[in-house]
Image (spheres, rainbow, N blue to C red):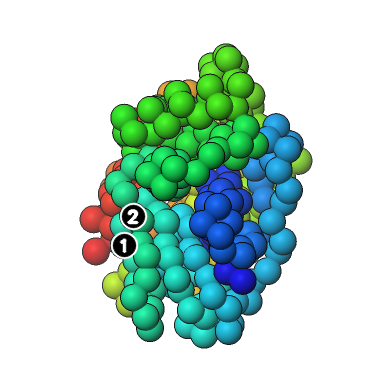
Amino acid sequence: MILVVGHKNPDSDSICSALVATELLRARGEEATPIRQGEINRETQHILEVAGAELPELRTSVAGEKIWLVDYSDLAQAPDDVAEAQILGIVDHHRLGDVMTVNPMEAWIWPVGCTNTVLFNMFKIEGHAISPTIAKLMMSAILSDTVGFASPTCTQKDKDAVEELATIAGVNDVDAFIKDLLIAKTNIEGLSAAELVEKDLKGYPFNGRDVVVGQVELATLEQVDGMIDALEADLTSRCEEQNLAFAAVMLTDITTAQTRLLYKGEWAEKLTKHEKDGMLMMENTLSRKKQGWPWLQAELV
Ligand SMILES: [Mn+2]
């Protein structure tokens, strides 16, 4: 049995990738099961409902198991006991991380907008049939990761994949499909400051210290107007409790690509020079991976 596991703090791509890669392995004649390392967000819940797919089982230990990693290759995002598992494969679209394997393994890492774009091409290369449910999972993940094709991470391969997948899925109106997805993605009603910071929080080892950067995608920055103090207080206590050098959250208006950065920690003073009227605004910034984190790395050195 192969366990297919996405990253910690799973986003939609991470969950859909686990489900889709499991189908690919089964099509190859392997026994496989998708698992997840955490609770899913509202967008993912919406996607699973639309696709009619089952939520992967919550499981955070993989010691002694054969596993595939989907949507990451960093130790920090893997199950804590990943060193005791046998990694057989990786499908990803991020920079190559620091996981190590004992034996040779299969790696599919492409510079595209979404892991599901790589998986879609694997299905095609290997000639496996794609069911409407799997097609919906794949196209939803691609549209989520690329923010409806608007993200700078989006490539022609992502667009081509969605075009083919929409036909298989029987989705005639892709724009309406994107709109429903974005409504579910930006629904933060009733979430606490801590829940917002944790919604899509990634940990990065940097210069010998630990840093976390979260991102909240919004339809308008006004959605978090009353929560700035609480969000900053959460970042501060997170730094203290986890000995982080820096904790930040990108508040991104996905309709204008404008991001407000909230940040705290020992290294926070390195960024204050970029503030205007007490706010650090990052214009034209949708992607943490391609824009937010690279900029922060240069500033935090
Ligand atoms: Mn992804």
Q: Position of residue 156 (x, y in %)?
A: 31, 30
Give coordinates of residue 134: x percent, y percent: 60, 40
Q: Can residue 293 be seen in this snapshot?
A: no
The percent position of residue 106, horizontal first and vertical second, equals: 37, 65
* Badge 2: residue crowd in 10 Å (few <14, some 14–19, many ≥20): some
Query: Which marked residue is nearer to the observer: mark 2 or mark 1?
Result: 2
Q: How many marks are shown on the rendered structure?
A: 2
Return the residue at label 2.
Answer: 109
- In the image, residue 160 sits, relative to residue 79, either above or below, namely above
Disc 2 and disc 1 in contact, CB within 8 angstroms: yes
With 80 as the anchor, is 265 left or right in this view? left
Quarter-of-image position of residue 60? bottom right
Q: Nearer the viewer, residue 262 or 229?
A: 262
User: In the picture shown, does residue 168 fall above or below 301?
Assistant: above
Camera-side residue of 221 and 127: 127
Question: In the rendered structure, which amino acid carries the disc numbered 1?
Answer: Leu
Secondary structure beneath dot 1 equals: loop
What residue is shown with label 1?
96
Residue at point 65% right, 36% down? 133
Residue at point 50% right, 44% down?
A: 128
Instruction: Tell me the element at label 2.
Output: strand
